[in-house]
Image: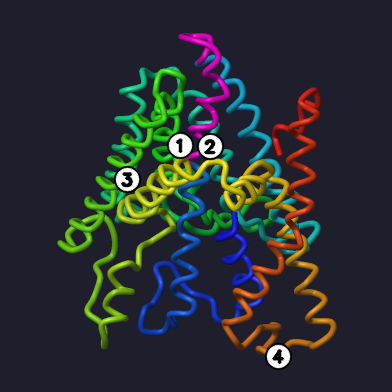
Amino acid sequence: MLFMLLDHVRETFYLHLQVPDPMVVADTPPGLFFPRMLAHLCAPVFVFLTGLGAYLYASRHAGAAQARTASGFLWRRGLFLVLLEVTVVNFAWTFQFPPAKIFLQVIWVIGLSMLALSVLVWLPRKALLLLGLVLIAGHNLLDGLHFPAGHVMHVPWAILHDRGWLELAGVQLRTSYPLLPWIGVIALGYGIGPWFGKACDSAQRRRCLLMAGIASLLGFALLRTLNVYGDAPWLTGTNALQTLMSWFNVTKYPPSLLFLMLTLGIGLLLLCAFENAAGRNGLQMLATLGAAPMFFYVLHLYVLKFMYLAAVAFWGANQGQLFGLSSLLWLWVIAALLAVALYPAASWFAALKQRRRDITWLKYL
C-alpha cells in the first residue's frame, strides 16, 4: 500500500516526467526508475493475495460447499470492483463527468480476475495451479498476435492481452491492464491457500513460501541473463548502473513472465519474512493499511487529486500545461507525509470493519 502511494504521488506531481513501459533506461534517472520498480510489486501482490483471501474466506467449508462459497463471493465482489473502477475510481483520476475517457486499471483487472476465478474454483487444485502457471509462463508467446479495429476479436483481445484504446458510445476506454496473465496470478493465489490452512503449521508454511520465492527469483535470474524469453531483451548501458537498470527493466502491461517471476518471488519472500515478524508494532501499523485496502485506495486518490488542483490554483502550471515538482526528493516527502496523515482514517475504518461485521457491504471495502 505504501509503494502504491509513492507511485501515485509520482503520477500526480511528476506527470512531466512520465515513464513508458518498459522504461527507457537511457532517459530515466535512477530517482524515477527505482521508485517505479518498487511500485511494480503492488499489482501482482494485490491480485495474488486476492486469490489467497478468497480461499481463506471459503475455507471454513469443504468440498463443493467451499467452491460454492468462494464462487459466490468472487462473483459479487468482482462485479462490485468493475463498477467501482468505471465510476468512483475513474472520476478520481479524471474529474470528468460524464467521462470522455475511462481508464480500465488495477481495480478493473482485479474485478475481472475474480469473475474468472469464480468459475475456475470448481477445478481440482492441481489443475488450477497448472492453469495459473501456463497462463503466466505462456502468454508472452501471444505477444505478436494483434487484431485490427473492426475485427471480431479486436475488443476481446484488447481486454485479454493487447493493451490499447477502445470506443464505446463516444467514450474512449483504455485497457491499461490486459487480463489474461492476471487470471494466472489470482489462480496461483487461490491454489496456495492450503499453505495458510489449519493443516499447515507456521514452520511448514514459511518453508513453502521460502522455497517458492527463491525458485521464482532464480528462474527470473536465469531467464533474464539468457535473454531468450519472457520480456524485451536487456542491453548493456553506458555504465554499470544503466546495465543493471536494463537487466531489471521488466514489462508491466501486460505483465511479462519475468515481471511476474520477479515481483511474485519477492512477494512470497515478504510473506515469509512478515510471518516471522508477526506482532511487531511496525508491522501492525502496516497491517492496518492492509485491513482497509479499498477505503485507503479510494481515499488517497481523491486526496492527491485535490492536492494537485490546489497546487495548480496556488502556483499555476509550471511544466507546460501541468504543475510539476522539479526535485525528486519531494516524491518521498509527500508520500511519507500522506502516509502519516491518512493513517488515522484507515485505522478508524479498519476498526469499524472489525467491529461491525453485521454490516455486509463493509467487507467489500
Q: Earlier in the sequence, mark 2 or mark 4?
A: 2
Q: Residue furthest front?
A: 280
| First to last magenta residue range | 48-66
Residue on which the image places disc 3 = 213
Within 10 Å of disc 1 (Cα), the crowding (few <14, some 14-19, many 20+) is many
Residue on which the image places disc 4 = 318
- Residue at 75% x, 67% y is 305
* Position in image of residue 250 (x %, y %): 35, 63
Q: Earlier in the sequence, mark 1 or mark 3?
A: 1
Cα distance in 3D space between marks 2 and 4: 40 Å
Q: Examine the image and state in which quarter residue 8 appears.
A: bottom right
Task: Point out the image quarter for the C terminus.
Answer: top right
Cα distance in 3D space between marks 2 and 1: 7 Å
User: In the image, 145: left or right of 336?
Assistant: left
Q: Earlier in the sequence, mark 4 or mark 1?
A: 1
Q: Which mark is residue 23?
A: none
Residue on which the image places disc 2 = 50
Residue on which the image places disc 1 = 186
Task: Point out the image quarter for the N terminus.
Answer: bottom right
Within 10 Å of disc 4 (Cα), the crowding (few <14, some 14-19, many 20+) is few
- Which numbered disc, 3 or 4, marks the residue closer to the eye? 3
* Position in image of residue 239 (x %, y %): 26, 86
Task: Assign a secondary structure to mark 4.
Answer: loop
